[in-house]
């Protein structure tokens, strides 16, 4: 039963990403060339919603489905970390035309070349795991 919930959530996510055109390579290129507000509106809405929901979780001390308290630890500010990570992430996003969520939506729509992008993202994550103890955190 639990798997069905995740599958339905994934299908809903894919529909929303497709209908909002957030998976469109052209929309992403418009964003990186500062030619359209469309993607900035989607991202900005997601950030605002995320901030609001995080505050609701913290202030109401909500619990997860298992009954455990949801703990969101504070993060140490590190400008270098965010600049470097954002630059790497943004470069990959601009080159491939897809960030992690839409990669799987595009694959589900039959764009098989996304298998290379997904494999590269997984390799990058693996390599980060190998060197993260040497990075400034």
Image: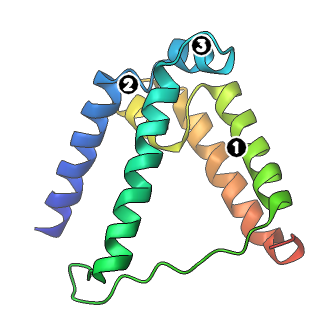
* Dot 2: element: loop
Numbered badge on residue 110? 2
Q: Tell me the quadrant of the picture where the N terminus can be found.
A: bottom left
Q: Where is mark 3, residue-wise?
A: 30
Question: Which sits in the foreground, 107 or 67?
Answer: 67
Please tell me in which quadrant of the rendered image residue 77 appears: bottom right
* Dot 1: element: helix
State the separation of the CA atoms marked 2 and 1: 24 Å
First of labels 3, 1 by sequence position? 3
Q: Tell me the quadrant of the picture where the C terminus can be found.
A: bottom right
Q: Residue 125 in the image: state x and y as whole percent.
A: 67, 58
Q: Residues within 10 Å of mark 3 (few under 14, many from 20)?
A: some
Q: Residue 53 in the image: state x and y as whole percent.
A: 34, 61
First of labels 2, 1 by sequence position? 1
* Dot 3: element: helix
Nearer to us of marks 2 and 3 is 3
Q: Which coloring applies here?
A: rainbow
Residue at the location (37% across, 50% down)? 49
Residue at the location (73% across, 46% down)? 86
Please tell me in which quadrant of the rendered image residue 76 appears: bottom right
State the separation of the CA atoms marked 2 and 3: 23 Å
Q: Where is mark 1, residue-wise?
A: 89
């Amino acid at each position: 039963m639990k798997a069905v919930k995740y599958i339905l959530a994934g299908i809903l996510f894919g529909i929303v990403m497709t209908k909002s055109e957030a998976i469109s390579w052209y929309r992403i290129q418009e964003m990186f060339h500062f030619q359209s507000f469309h993607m900035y509106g989607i991202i900005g809405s997601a950030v605002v919603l995320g901030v609001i929901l995080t505050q609701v979780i913290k202030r109401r001390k909500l619990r997860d489905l298992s009954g455990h308290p949801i703990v969101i630890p504070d993060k140490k500010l590190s400008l270098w970390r965010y600049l470097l990570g954002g630059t790497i992430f943004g470069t990959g996003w601009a080159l491939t035309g897809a960030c992690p969520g839409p990669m799987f939506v595009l694959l589900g729509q039959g764009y098989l070349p996304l298998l290379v992008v997904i494999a590269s993202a997984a390799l990058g994550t693996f390599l980060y795991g190998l060197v993260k103890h040497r990075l400034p955190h």
